Amino acid sequence: MNMKEVVLGLGTNVGRREDNLARAIDAIRSRVGNILRVSSVYETEPWGFETDSSFLNMALVAETALGAGTLISNVLGIESSMGRQRSGSAYESRVIDIDILFFGDEVIGRKVLDVPHPRLHLRKFVLVPLNEIMPGFMHPVLGKTIHGLLEECDDRSLVALYRPGP
């Protein structure tokens, strides 16, 4: 079986955010593959829209035998099963968002799947958790490490290590 490492970014700002991440991780383990590395959880400002609720974001690396088409189908299925309803292309609050950031070192440009994620290098809420678990990973299109992309990133939004309240 040909195994590939897939890198996923997770985010949530609706409902019980910590529980949403835990449920998504369990679903990824059962529908995508073995989880190899998981970042810390970060509290982040919304990106691209206004809302009163901050996000919890994290990244993980999983090993999968799935092809790209089945992978995106399973990821969208996880989001849907958790109550995610997509209303179009606008940024909005969500119970869960799972982005495929990297699929090995493949470059995929399809209508439903663009990998590497085309905007990950512009977003600190993606780069900070990635830098924690894979700082030396070379972006297959931009030819720079995650650490280098984070150092160059112009995003000034707040990304702080999450400290759960009492």
Image: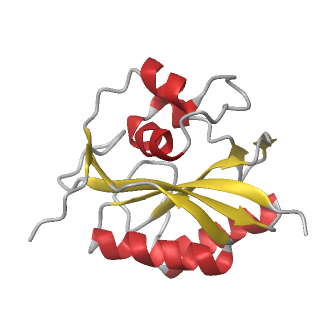
Quadrant of the rendering where the N terminus is positioned: bottom right
Question: Please, which colouring scheme is shown?
Answer: secondary structure
Q: So how many labels did they put on this image?
A: 0
Q: Residue at x 50, y 43 (%)?
A: 130
Q: Nearer the viewer, residue 38 or 21?
A: 38
Q: Nearer the viewer, residue 58 or 84?
A: 58
Q: Residue at x 89, y 63 (%)?
A: 2
In the image, 129: left or right of 110?
A: left
Q: Position of residue 86 (x, y in %)?
A: 50, 63
Q: Residue furthest left?
A: 166
Considering only vertical position in the picture, is 152 above or below 101? above
In the image, 52: left or right of 24?
A: left
Quadrant location of residue 5? bottom right
Q: Residue furthest right?
A: 1
Quadrant location of residue 83? bottom left
Q: Nearer the viewer, residue 26 or 137?
A: 137
Quadrant location of residue 62? bottom right
Quadrant of the rendering where the C terminus is positioned: bottom left
Q: Position of residue 93 (x, y in %)?
A: 34, 58
Considering only vertical position in the picture, is 120 above or below 143? below
Q: Residue at x 32, y 57 (%)?
A: 56
Q: Position of residue 158 (x, y in %)?
A: 25, 37
Q: Position of residue 19 (x, y in %)?
A: 33, 76
Q: Residue at x 81, y 68 (%)?
A: 65
